[in-house]
Amino acid sequence: MRYVDTASLAALERARSGLGGVAYLLDDDLVGAIGDSSLPLHYRFYMAHFWFRYARRIGALASEMWVSSGVLARRYAEAGVVYRIDPAPARFALPSARPPNERPDISIFYHGQKTHRADRRWLRDVMIPVLDDCPTCGFEIVGGREARRSYAGLPRVTVLPPMLWPEYWRRSQTTRLDIGLAPLVPTPFNAARSWVKYLDIARFGAVGVFAAGEPYESVVRDGHNGVVRPADNKASWSEALIALVRDAALRNRLTTAIDWPTNVETPPTLRRFMSMDHARSPT
């Protein structure tokens, strides 16, 4: 995995002669993070410390790389054997299988955490006209002190503290929200994102508004299972959100079409392991 620790790496190195191979899973752009000024300084420092300490050892050990986006696959194409790996989580109830939202208020949300600071700032201008025009909607965002300062003074905004994954997953099973946002401000780190937010939004039973282009173009069709808008056009995002808030039939039609992506990329090695596990499972 991305953050292999010293003990695990040493154990793999000792066992190398008895292994069929080692795959390194890279699910974010560690190198891009180091020079990305939109990220928190402590996060950039951690990425630099990790990469300069372990990259050479990982490169010597790994027989193949599994990367989470087309951008990363192209970047590391000459480094050896590189495969794309897309999100494939344990199945959850899709929006069409969730109980309908009976509340009169409409919830809009963005759940990007510490590496999404640029996106949180960008969305503030998007949300101002939406909150002004739609008094029945509220906005939920995850963040810390910086997010609270940025959104201070806007009506009906709730800033939640960052959550660990188990807590976040449990909340997604018990809370239904209406409209999720997946912007993608053009930064070095964002350029290599995967489309996992398509699933994060679906977990809450919501329809999503997604940035056009990679990575969402592979799983979202505008007007079918979500809304796609230009990544740099705030006005078009505001207009799309206002239309979704006002039109319950549109929201319902889009959420009904949300399904599991059919073009999920899986490394051949992983497919073989999955087939072996399936063959051993009792029928």
Image: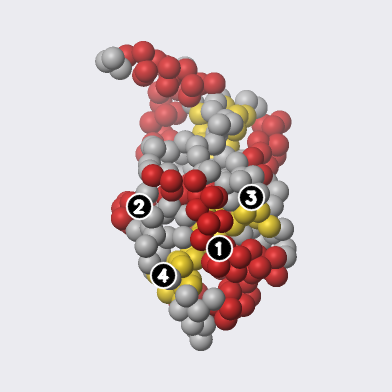
Which percent across, then down, holds residue 90? 38, 37
Q: Is residue 115 visible?
A: no
Count the marks: how many?
Answer: 4
Between marks 1 and 3 in the image, the one whose residue lies nearer the viewer: 1
In space, the residues marked 1 and 3 are separated at their CA atoms by: 13 Å
In primary-sequence order, the first of circles 4 and 2 is: 2
Name the residue at 45% across, 66% down. 107
Q: Which residue is mark 2?
A: 99
- Name the residue type under label 1: Asp
Between discs 1 and 4, the one toward the N terminus: 4
Residue at 43% x, 48% y: name it.
95
Residue 223's disc is: 3
The first of marks 1 and 2 along the sequence is 2
Q: Is residue 83 visible?
A: yes
Cα–Cα gap, marks 4 and 2: 15 Å
Return the mark for residue 247.
1
Disc 2 residue type (three-letter): Pro
Q: Which mark is residue 104?
A: 4
Which label belongs to residue 84?
none
User: What is the distance, in whole Å, between disc 1 and disc 2 at their CAs?
Assistant: 18 Å
Distance from Cα at disc 3 to Cα at disc 4: 23 Å
- Packing grade of label 1 (10 A; few <14, some 14-19, many >=20) is few
Residue type, numbered disc 3:
Gly
Q: Secondary structure at mark 4?
A: loop
First in sequence: mark 3 or mark 4? 4
Residue 243: image quadrant is bottom right
Seen from this angle, which residue lies furthest front?
A: 249
Type of the residue with mark 4: Pro
* Residue 79, position as x, y percentages in the image: 67, 31
